Structures are given as structure tokens and as C-alpha cells.
Image (tube, helix red, strand yellow):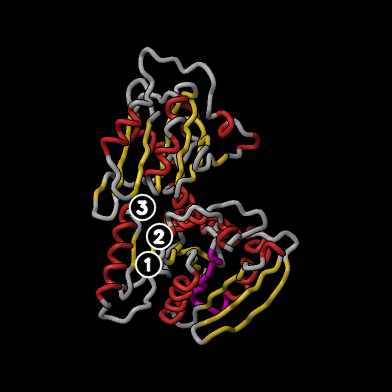
Amino acid sequence: MSVPVALVAGLHGPARTAVVDRLLREHPGSLAIHHELRRITDGEVVRIVRDAAGVRQRARFRLAHGCTTCTVREDLIPQLLLHAPDTGLLVVDLWDSVEPRTVAEALDRPELCDELRLTAVLTAIDPELTPVDICRGETLAEAGKPAAAGDERHFAEVLARQMEYATALVMPQVMPAPLPQADTETIDMCREVLGHLVPMTVLTSPGEPLPALTGPALCTGELAARVDPATAQLPGDSHTPAADTVVWRRTRPLHPERFFDTLDVLATESVRSRGRFWLANRPDRMIAWDAVAGIVTIEDAGPWLAALPEAAWEMLPPARRLAAALDWAPGTGDRVQHLVFTGPGLDRREIHALLDSCLLAPEDSADGDDPFAPFLDLPDGRHADTGPNH
């Protein structure tokens, strides 16, 4: 019988530790494994194994290539297999800036399924820091939280991906009940913000029961489909006192130069934006838009289904075909402009007017310079951040 494995991610270490502590208390006989990557840029890792009573093992070792992938492959998985026969639940307490998707997909392998099964991906939420940190524009290195040498990711983008990939978000039980009024307001504000950013993800507030952790194995393909550009579950239009979410959907193509000229405005007026779009000069390619805290990433996400022969559709995952069917329109197929913007005080009419002005008009031509070429025509499938000012 395989042993359940729960991942706990989160950039806010104290909140994540509090969630792991609760899991260990509520699941007698469980064990948590944590890799401290504070000195990963020097190739040094500290492994900490603990249970509800305290630390059982602390070991310091070095990796030839200091990175998260090496840590998971060379130490985490062997440790999980070592302790699996003696525990009913294994908790992987991920280092601050580690994104859970990489670890989840490393665990979802046929050769491990008889001994380990991934049952939950939790992200710990600090209700006071999260609404502020989703706006932070500095890099992880600048924040002192890199997960590898040369880690160029930004703080806010990692926080966003940790939240969006999770099967549940958990606020730690750090305040006594009944909660003081100020703390109640902080939690309510955070819940409101998360309701815009991840409206379809379960959120556990202090005092509420935790999600079940001992059920069947998760399918990481389904988890990926929730966040990948072609199939992502994007938020809908919403307005609350703290924030607005504005959805823009059209089928006409975008004029590449006019749209490129709007990137700064779109990225800086919203806190978080995501989606997919198509350009008049690249009609066969889906392009992914991902922006947080003013940092925009533009990436070629592959062909639209309408650009493929029907015989190739059967080779694609069901989620991809379903998403295309929902977007399908006569003449354009699944080609769609679907962009979602979240931030405080957004003006829906203004955003729609700006984006509508970028659509290709009958008298327009898409010929000429392509300002997206430096970001889309990269070797080896790489992508580029445009940054806050391209």
C-alpha cells in the first residue's frame, strides 16, 4: 500500500512551518522532510526530518550542481522511500521559493506509485503579507530567497504560481479564538484578494478543518491543465471593495505594434494578469500572457487547434480539446483573445476600450516590423520576460 505524500509550499516560512506543525499534530505518526536551501548557491543543503515531537535528524550535505531539481532527485525522493515503510503520512516542507509543480511532477512517476502517492499540494498563506507581497517587483535573489545560483525569478511571480498550482490554500492557526477584530479584518481582506486571484481553490482559514490528505493519488497532468495557458481556469469578472477582476474576450486578431505599445499600461495598472491571445501576423500560434507586479512574460504556447489537421487533435489531452471546443467560433476556430486583469480600482470600460483599439481593423495591415519577435523567436523553446518596460 502506497504512503500518502503532501507537499506544503509557501514563500512565508513561519506560516508554512505553522501549517506543517498542524499536519504533524493532526496525523499521528506522520513525518516531515524539509530541505533548507539558504546556501544552495554554494551547493550546500541542510536536510531536516521531524515529527510532532521535534527534530529527528539534521544533516548537512553538498550537491555537485546546487539546484532544486538536484535536491529532489538526489535526496528528497530517496528520503521519502526510506521513511515510507514507517509512517502513515509524509509531509514535504518545501523551501520558501520552491514551486510545487516541479516536485509534484517528480513524484508522479510509474516507478514510485507502489510506494508513494501524491495526495495534496498545499500552499501556506500569511494573511497579512500575501496581499502586499503579490505586488513585490524584486527578484528572489534581491529578497534573499533564491532556489539556485542565477535564479532570476521574481518574488511575486513565484508567490502567484505557488497559489495557483495548489489544491488548497491554508492560513495557519496562529491566533487564538475568538480572533481580535484587527486580525479578523486582515483575514477577511486576504480572503477577498484570494477570491479574485484563485477563486476556484479551496481556502482554509484559521480554525477550519484541513483538507483530506490520505485519499487517492493526484494526477499532475490535471493539476498542470489548471494553470497551463491553453487550458487554465481563469477568474471571471468580479468587483469587491479591495479589488476588481476584468475579463476581456474577443475573436478578432490583435495588431502586433499597437498591442505591444500597450504592454506597460496593462502590466502596471493591474497587479496580476493572465491569458492567451493571437496576433494578426502569427495566426497559427497561441501566445501566453503572464504578468505580476509589473513583470510581463510573453511565451509561444504552441499551435491553435484550428491550425492543426483534425487527425492531430486525438493526440492532444482531453482538457486541451475541451478548452478549444468552448472557445470555438466560426471562421476563427479556437483562436481567442482571453485576458484577465486583477487589481484595485480597475476601470473595466477603460481596459476594454484600450484593448479594443488594438484589434486589427479592416483597413489595417499586419506587415512590417514585429515587436514581439525578440520575445517569441527564441531558440530551444525558451521564453523571455519583457520586464516592466519591455
Q: Nearer the viewer, residue 319 or 386?
A: 386
Q: Which mark is residue 128?
A: 1
**Amino acid type for the residue under numbered disc 2:** Val
Residue 48, quarter of the rendered image: bottom right
Label at residue 227: none
Mark toward the start of the polypeptide (3 vs 1): 1
Is residue 78 depicted above or below 333 in this figure? below
Quick check: can you spot residue 88? yes
**Tag 3: residue type?**
Leu
Secondary structure found at label 3: helix
Q: In the image, which disc is placed on residue 197?
A: 3
Image: 155 above or below 170:
above
Residue 329 in percent (x, y) is at 33, 26
Circle 1 sits in a helix, a strand or a loop, which is it? loop
Whole-angstrom CA distance, mark 3 to mark 2, is: 13 Å
- Is residue 212 placed above or below 54 in the rendered structure? above
The quadrant in which residue 212 appears is bottom left
Q: Say which residue label 2 marks.
A: 132
Q: Where, by quadrant of the figure, is residue 97 drawn? A: bottom right
Q: CA distance from mark 2 to mark 1?
A: 8 Å
Taking the view exactly as shown, the residue that stands out farthest to the right is: 64
Q: CA distance from mark 3 to mark 1?
A: 16 Å
The span shown in magenta is: 84-96
Residue drawn at (45%, 62%) of the image:
121
Q: Where residue 299 sits: x, y (%)?
A: 52, 37
What amino acid is labelled 1 in the image? Glu
Q: Residues within 10 Å of mark 2 (few under 14, many from 20)?
A: few
